[in-house]
């Protein structure tokens, strides 16, 4: 992420970047977000978006790693990839909700490129606090995270950097 004259620029890979006006990017409060995805590129893209909006991203490459992280520290929100090897995002959510610790109440947002096998309402019925399709759109991601965490969403003024 680069800071340039009152704006922050985040690169999203493949030559795509965006600018966020610093005055509009400040959240009501900074959130700590656990992002669980088996794809390092997806983890990097979401981290860039979250940090551009003043939030902290913690990354986990698997469901097992996510459960370990959740047991070690508190998170405001979890972004959960649905299709991962060894343990699906749905299975991780079931384990989170079945735990005895405070993490059981952490809002979990489903993140998936598979928009054909389930409707967003089905993810909500499974216990997810929201749904974000991949490829991730900046405004949709920030809106879902702030809504799930119960904080006011900053005004979003984005434009493609170029």
Image: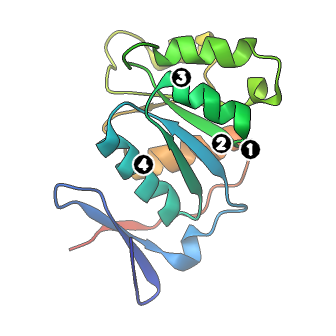
Q: Residues within 10 Å of mark 2 (few under 14, many from 20)?
A: some
Where does residue 72 sit, x and y in percent of width and height? 71, 37
* Secondary element at image label 3: helix
Q: Is residue 5 left or right of residue 53?
A: left
Q: Nearer the viewer, residue 76 or 152?
A: 76
Q: Which mark is residue 64?
A: 3
For label 4, the SS is: helix
Q: Are marks 1 and 4 in contact (CB under 8 Å)?
A: no
Report, in whole angstroms, how far the alpha carbon at label 1 lies from the one at label 4.
20 Å
Q: Nearer the viewer, mark 1 or mark 4?
A: 4
Do residues under tags 2 and 1 come within 8 Å of each other at their CB atoms? yes
Question: Is 89 left, or right, of 10 in this rendering?
Answer: right
| Discs 4/3, front | 3
Residue 14 at x, y percent in the picture: 17, 55
Mark 4 or mark 2, whichever is nearer to me: 4
Residue behind mark 1: 150
Picture layout, residue 118 above or below residue 70: above
Report the residue marked by disc 2: 147
Which residue matches tag 4? 46
Crowdedness of circle 1 by 10 Å Cα count: few (<14), some, many (20+)?
few
CA–CA distance in space, label 3 to label 2: 26 Å
- Whole-angstrom CA distance, mark 1 to mark 3, is 27 Å
User: Of the residues under marks 1 and 3, which one precedes in the sequence?
Assistant: 3
């Amino acid at each position: 992420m680069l800071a340039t004259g009152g704006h922050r620029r985040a690169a999203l890979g493949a030559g795509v970047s965006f600018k966020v006006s610093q005055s509009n990017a400040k959240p009501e409060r900074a959130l700590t977000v656990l992002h669980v995805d088996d794809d390092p590129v997806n983890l990097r893209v979401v981290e860039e978006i979250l940090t551009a909006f003043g939030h902290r991203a913690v990354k986990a490459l698997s469901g097992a790693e996510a459960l370990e992280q959740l047991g070690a520290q508190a998170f405001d929100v979890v972004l959960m990839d649905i299709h991962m090897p060894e343990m699906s995002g749905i299975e991780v959510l079931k384990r989170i909700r079945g735990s005895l610790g405070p993490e059981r109440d952490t809002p979990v947002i489903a993140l998936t490129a598979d928009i054909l096998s389930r409707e967003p309402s089905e993810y909500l019925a499974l216990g997810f606090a929201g749904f974000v399709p991949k490829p991730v759109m900046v405004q949709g991601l920030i809106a879902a995270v702030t809504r799930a965490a119960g904080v006011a969403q900053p005004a979003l003024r984005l434009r493609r950097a170029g």
